[in-house]
């Protein structure tokens, strides 16, 4: 199997594991013999920022940007269009950027695909159809690449 296919498969598996690690589970299900599951806290386990960063690193993703780096990314998105970041959802924009880095890593030579994935990931295609075009997608993609995963 060619190396790039193995690399993409490994990235996909790692991203899936990262997602499972970062989201936790919301409860237990009954076992196959229908006995009630053991009582657990209803709140999912919370990971520290260091644990989230370690999980991202293990999956080949960059850590969450902090301080000036984070603000520069958010400012870059707002300079494209202030509606890209939903009000009060800066963390969501950061998360989407980090996830877009996985696509950048998986499809480094297919800018058209990356632009389309960017428009979809940031929900521009569904929320902001009037700016859903390759120009906007390319600008958002470039902001992600520059501020979150420049080494990809």
Image (cartoon, helix red, strand yellow):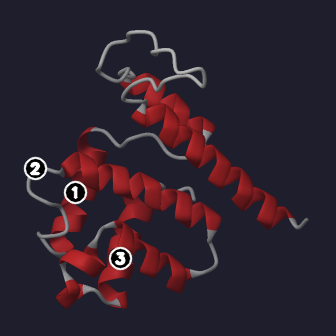
Where is residue 67 shown, x and y percent of the image? 25, 39
Question: Who is closer to the viewer here, 31 or 45?
Answer: 31
Marks 1 and 3: CB-CB under 8 Å?
A: no
Residue pushed farthest left?
Answer: 87
**Could you tell me residue 65's position as x and y percent?**
35, 43
Does label 2 or label 3 sit earlier along the sequence? 2
Please rate how many residues cluster around mark 2, counting C-alpha atoms within 10 Å: few if below 14, some from 14 to 19, many from 20: few
Q: Residue furthest right?
A: 1
Q: CA distance from mark 1 to mark 3?
A: 16 Å
Q: Which mark is residue 74?
A: 1
Residue 61 visible at all: yes
Which mark is first along the chain, 3 or 1? 1
Determine which quarter of the picture holds residue 145: bottom left
Nearest to the observer: residue 25 or residue 99: 25
Q: Is residue 64 rendered to the left or right of residue 54?
A: left
In the picture provided, is 120 more to the left or to the right than 123? Answer: right
Q: Which mark is residue 119?
A: 3
Residue at x 37% of width, y 12% of height: 40
In the picture as drawn, the residue positioned furthest to the front comes out as 34
Measured in 3D between alpha carbons, the distance from the residue under mark 2 to the one under mark 3, in whole angstroms, is 20 Å
């Amino acid at each position: 199997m060619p190396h790039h296919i193995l690399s993409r498969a490994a990235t996909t598996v790692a991203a899936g594991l990262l997602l499972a690690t970062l989201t936790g589970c919301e409860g237990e299900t009954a076992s196959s013999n229908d006995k009630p599951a053991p009582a657990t806290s209803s709140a999912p386990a919370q990971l520290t920022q260091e644990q989230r960063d370690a999980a991202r690193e293990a999956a080949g993703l960059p850590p969450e940007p902090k301080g000036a780096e984070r603000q520069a990314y958010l400012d870059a998105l707002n300079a494209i269009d202030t509606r890209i970041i939903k009000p009060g959802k800066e963390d969501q924009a950061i998360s989407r950027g980090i996830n877009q880095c996985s696509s950048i890593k998986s499809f480094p030579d297919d800018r058209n695909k990356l632009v389309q994935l960017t428009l979809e990931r940031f929900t521009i295609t569904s929320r902001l159809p009037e700016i859903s075009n390759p120009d906007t997608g390319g600008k958002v993609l470039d902001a992600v690449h520059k501020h979150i995963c420049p080494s990809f």
